[in-house]
Amino acid sequence: MPKKLIQRLMPDHQKIKSNKHLKIFGALLHNANLWYLNRNSVSKAFAVGLFFAFMPVPFQMILAAGIAIIVHANLPLSIALCWITNPLTMPAIFYFCYVVGTWIVGVPTRQFAFEASWQWLAESISTIGPAFIVGCVVLGIIFSILGYISINTIWRYSVAKEWKKRQARRR
């Protein structure tokens, strides 16, 4: 069942509650529904986390936490999914976002070397920026919708499968 797998992989509640960057949310972090695993909260967490994983901002974890609190998504999962874009995966993912953005905007691709810094972003915003930002937003939306639908479907399927097993055992 997805719930058991997700529970094993989720970060510790106390570790997240004590994170210095998340202290701005104060008492909102004590809402028990933000830590509970059910189909609805996990599906929303995948949508929130995957969307912010594609956003090229250094504080994506805080943004994901804020939106997770607003939409009542599972907070640890929303934050953890932001780290899909980590220093190892970021260049490939963001290059793909740029390519998709150039296709959408209709401009030719340019050669560039990605750097994870504000200086690079400020210098590149006028040349590759529009295509890059459009690609990030579009792919963020697409992957968040796919994540939501996939988790929702997998969860429903696994619950139906468990019910069938129970019914078979009762007979």
Image: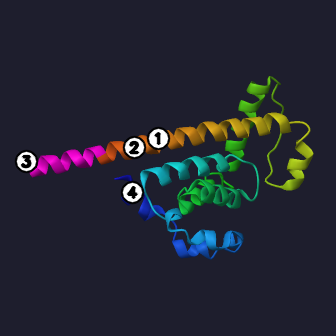
- Residue under pointer 2: 154
Disc 3 to disc 1: CB gap under 8 Å: no
Q: Is label 2 in contact with label 1 (beta carbons under 8 Å)?
A: yes
User: How many angstroms separate mark 4 from mark 2 (CA)?
Assistant: 11 Å
Residue 109 is one of the magenta-drawn residues: no
Question: How packed is label 4: few (under 14 Cα within 10 Å), some, or many (20 or more)?
Answer: few
Percent x, y for residue 60?
Answer: 70, 56
Q: Which residues are magenta?
A: 160-171
Q: For the residues marked 2 and 1, what is the alpha-carbon distance in whole angstroms?
A: 6 Å
Whether residue 97 appears in this view of the structure is no
Disc 3 on helix, strand or loop?
Answer: loop
Q: Which residue is mark 3?
A: 171
Q: Is the magenta region chiefly helix, strand or loop?
A: helix
Q: Is residue 51 left or right of residue 6?
A: right
Mark 2: few/some/many CA within 10 Å (<14, 14-19, 20+): some
Amino acid type, residue under disc 3 in the picture: Arg
Q: Amino acid at mark 2?
A: Ile
Disc 3/disc 2 C-alpha distance (Å): 26 Å
Q: Amino acid at mark 1?
A: Ser
Q: Earlier in the sequence, mark 3 or mark 2?
A: 2
Q: Give the residue number, with chain letter if any, for mark 4.
A: 3
Observer able to see residue 162 = yes
- Along the polypeptide, which appears first: circle 3 or circle 1? 1
Can you say whether 145 is above or below 103 in the image?
below
Say few, some or many: other residues with alpha carbon within 10 Å of mark 1 (under 14 / 14 to 19 / 20 or more). some
Colour scheme of the rendered structure:
rainbow
Tell me which label, 4 or 3, sits earlier in the chain. Answer: 4
Name the kind of residue labelled 4 in the image.
Answer: Lys
- View extreme (top): residue: 106
Calculate the distance from the C-alpha at mark 4 to the C-alpha at mark 3.
Answer: 26 Å
